[in-house]
Image: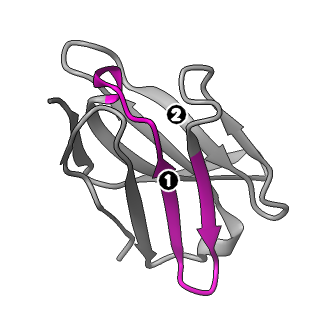
Amino acid sequence: QVQLVESGGDLVQPGGSLRLSCAASGFTFSRYAMNWYRQAPGKERELVAAITSPGGSTNYADSVKGRFTISRDDAKNTAYLQMNSLNPDDTGVYYCNAKREVGGLRYAYWGQGTQVTVSS
């Protein structure tokens, strides 16, 4: 059974930091690119950060560059999103996504999301 379980969301003041985790099971984690998306109230889900596999190349939305860092630990089947200098625009539900494309077939899994609220 495939599972992606996010954790680490919380209420934080502007300027604060959070570290999100995404624990994976039920598939070969090391073969999948990992992504973090977020969805703010009333807005569409957007890609925030991505990390490839193999290689670990990263990519970020312009709005989070220099503030967020995505990483992965294949030994622990876990992906992370370190978020610094948070501002109210970062508020939303953050989703973990695993993605792989093999022979023209796409495989994608989603977690249930974790709430991040940035407010004073």
The local secondary structure at tag 2 comes to strand
Q: Are marks 1 and 2 in contact (CB under 8 Å)?
A: no
- Which residue is depicted at the point 50% across and 72% down? 78
Q: Position of residue 101 (x, y in %)?
A: 71, 50
Instruction: State the image quarter where residue 31 is shown.
Output: bottom right
Query: Which mark lies nearer to you, 1 or 2?
Result: 1
Q: Residue at x 62, y 60 (%)?
A: 71
Residue at the image position 59 percent from the left and 73 percent from the top? 29
**Is residue 93 found left or right of 59 in the rendered image?**
left
Precedes in sequence: disc 1 or disc 2: 2
User: Where are the magenta residues, as a range?
Assistant: 69-90
The location of residue 70, given as percent across then percent down, is 60, 52
Find residue 82 and name its label.
Answer: 1
What is the x, y in percent for residue 66?
64, 34
Q: CA distance from mark 1 to mark 2?
A: 12 Å
Residue 107 within the segment the image draws in magenta: no
Q: Secondary structure at mark 1?
A: strand
Residue 37, image quadrant? top left
Q: Amino acid at mark 1?
A: Gln
Please, which residue is most extreme toward the bottom here?
75
**Is residue 76 located in the magenta-colored stretch of the structure?**
yes
